[in-house]
Amino acid sequence: MTEDYFTRGEKEFLLKIARTALEKIVSAGEKYEPQTVNQKLWEKYGVFVTLTRNGNLRGCVGYTEPIEPLILAIRDNTISATRDSRFEPIERGELEEIKIEISILGELEPIIFNNIEKGDGVVIKNGDRGATYLPQVWDELPDKKEFFESLCQKAGLDEEDYLNREMEFWKYGVVKFGEDRF
């Protein structure tokens, strides 16, 4: 999937779904029911929704597998991101300052550790523990060792478990866009 797979209008529509879902759940506790006749937006994708306030992360929730139609995945992950367990729930007074970013994932591709490059989205799995970092996390953790140590910690593993032969890796790309950039 290339960056231009979704048109600017489709991206704006998807951001509107996320914004409406955010405002309805935080302001009124209501679940928004998005609709569209655009069949492409009913296709299933892995998707993450990231919420920031003044440049600081306030929530990031999603899934790597194509579990539900895109418009519902964006709605549901937006709602979940308002209650990301790492942060206090988003409150009504914050809504105007919240910025939304959507990352639509391409297919997961099995890969060996040595072939992973900066800029790849990465999933790790060892037994029943696993985690993912979106490609944009490389901006914060550009050192490969630090990136994987942090990813292992996120998965509840020891820092150096990424060197373990049992570790499985997948890479993916994303189509990423947000309210402040396309």
Image (cartoon, grey):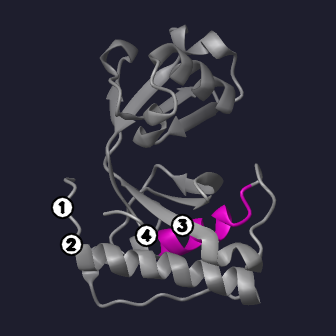
Residue in the picture at 69% in, 22% down: 157
Give the Cα separation between the discs numbered 2 and 4.
15 Å
Which of disc 3 and disc 2 is earlier in sequence? 2
Distance from disc 1 to disc 2, alpha carbons, whole Å, reads 6 Å
Cβ atoms under marks 4 and 3 closer than 8 Å = yes
Total count of labels = 4
Residue 87 position within the rendered picture, expressed as x and y whole percent measured from the top left: 77, 54
To which quarter of the image does residue 176 belong?
bottom left
Q: Work out whether 102 lies above or below 38.
A: above
Indicate the position of residue 16 as horizontal and vertical percent values: 44, 81
Q: Are marks 1 and 3 in contact (CB under 8 Å)?
A: no
**Range drawn in magenta:** 72-84
Label 1 to label 4: alpha-carbon separation: 17 Å
- What residue is pinned by disc 1? 4
The picture quadrant where one finds residue 28 is bottom right
Specify the label residue 7 is tagged with: 2
Q: Is residue 74 above or below residue 92?
A: above
Between 111 and 21, the one lying in front of the other is: 21
What amino acid is found at the position of numbered circle 4 in the picture? Answer: Glu
The x, y position of residue 82, in whole percent, is 69, 67
- Mark 1 falls on what kind of element? loop
Report if the CB atoms under discs 1 and 2 are less than 8 Å apart. yes
Position of 57 compared to 69: left or right? right
Judge the density around disc 4: few (<14), some (14-19), many (≥20) Cα neighbours within 10 Å.
some
- The structure residue drawn at horizontal position 37% and vertical position 65%, both measured from the top left corner, is 44
Q: Can residue 155 be seen here?
A: no
First in residue order: circle 4 vs circle 3: 3
Q: Mark 2 or 4, which is nearer the eye?
A: 4
Res. 55 mark: none
